[in-house]
Image (cartoon, rainbow, N blue to C red):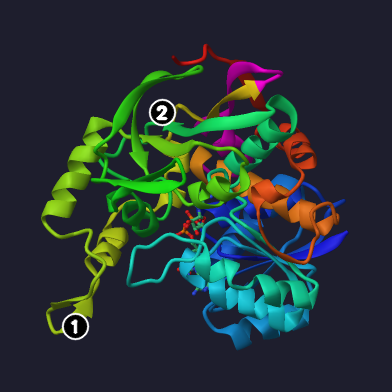
Amino acid sequence: MSKVLIIGAGGVGNVVAHKCAQVPEVFSEILLASRNENKCKVIAADVKAATGREIQTASVDAENVEATVALIKKFQPKLLINVALPYQDLPLMDACLHAGIHYLDTANYEPPNHAKFEYSWQWAYQERFQKAGLTALLGSGFDPGVTNVFCAYAQKHLFDEIELIDIMDANAGDHGYPFATNFNPEINIREITQRGRFWEQGEWREIDPLSIHQEYEYPVLGAKSSYLLYHEELESLAQNIKGLKRIRFFMTFSEKYLTHLRVLENVGMTRIDPIEFQGQQIVPIQFLKAILPDPASLGPRTKGKTCIGCDITGTKDGKKKRVFIYNICDHQECYREVKSQAISYTTGVPAMIGGAMLATGKWLRPGVWNMEQCDPDPFMDMLNQHGLPWHIQELPVAE
Ligand SMILES: NC(=O)c1ccc[n+]([C@@H]2O[C@H](COP(=O)([O-])OP(=O)(O)OC[C@H]3O[C@@H](n4cnc5c(N)ncnc54)[C@H](OP(=O)(O)O)[C@@H]3O)[C@@H](O)[C@H]2O)c1
């Protein structure tokens, strides 16, 4: 049994707190800390009502390493689950090293003034974590996270060699607003408006934003327009899946969403550089975040399902084979369980499971690791037990 410190009381933090509270045999005590402690207290009250468990709360600025170290030393957790923002990844990794505890996050570090997604900054901590005998687990959400584990599972059990992977992410949920993002709007819009990228024959290929799309037939959801984006798990999977020839990532967007995004981009509202406004500096995308619906408020309004999975082609026993490994998640069922929509749910459940892998020692190995570098089996078992059951569909091999 382990004490866990959760940092970040947003949509995902809410789910992680609920799900950790549901497994007292793994997480004996929980401290939820965020910049604004009131948000933690609201979540703690909901968790108490749902599970009967008390969780502690605190206020912390995760960018202040000393303050986080002091909090860790006082509470003495075994691990820290970072579900604040990607900007806080490095200071939180530093705090874990100083205080001697394990680290986990769900999104790779991004410098605030440059929309750039890559693992280099966090992989640079490899030696420090190794020397300290501590584990840092990167990207334990759904994508990245479960998608990496699906690929590791396919490599271990379903294929002799994997050639092609398309990660397919569909959200067929409707929240009734003309425009809102399902998780932090700043992080979400920065991801979508950058140039697309995929990996083929050992090289990265770049395309204009949202310029490649396909109609993909999702189980349960049916056909949906899915757009090629760069997504961070491509970087580690391209390195860790042996024999891979191509890996891409696709996400669904409605025409309405894309029209709003185009207009916001054209008028400069998605800019990430500061501008002068009435005598003060503001960053347009941060102002936009302030006026858009809070993703945590979408829960009660969102109806429909998500389907996220990996479409994998390769060979087994000399024969070509193609499978889709996926999960279907229902927004309203998530809301009934933890008062959150499926996007936060599908991120928060794997963050709890990754935490359990560290807390129980199953994935403890000094160093900095991406999810596919760990044994997929215990993680896949916990997905089935904790609200994200997965399925495997055999597909005809594309000519
Ligand atoms: N891998 C995946 O599948 C996946 C999917 C979705 C999201 N994510 C990641 O999950 C994370 C959380 O997303 P979310 O939707 O929950 O975002 P969110 O609702 O904006 O919540 C972020 C939380 O972090 C807190 N925070 C921000 N800066 C902080 C600081 N300096 N110190 C302490 N706390 C701070 C915020 O506190 P205040 O409210 O007080 O500002 C807020 O409670 C993000 O990193 C996102 O990229 C991953």
Q: Mark 1 points at which residue?
A: 280
Q: What stretch is highlighted in magenta?
A: 316-341
Looking at the picture, how far across and down is residue 249, in whole percent?
A: 43, 39
328 in magenta: yes
327 in magenta: yes
Q: Please, what secondary structure does the residue beneath circle 1 have? A: strand
Quadrant of the rendering where the N terminus is positioned: bottom right
In this picture, is 127 found above or below 110? below
In this picture, is 334 found above or below 103? above
Type of amino acid at the residue the image marks with label 2: Ala
Q: Distance between the residues labelled 1 and 2?
A: 40 Å
Looking at the picture, how far across and down is residue 144, in whole percent?
A: 55, 47
The residue nearer to you, when weighing 286 against 206, is 206
- On the question of residue 59 being in view, the answer is no
- Which quadrant holds residue 322? top right
Quadrant of the rendering where the C terminus is positioned: top left
The residue nearer to you, when weighing 150 against 42, is 150
Q: Mark 2 points at which residue?
A: 172
Residue at 84%, 53% in the rendered image:
26
124 on left or right of 70 = left
Question: Mark 1: is the Cβ under 8 angstroms from ligand 1?
Answer: no
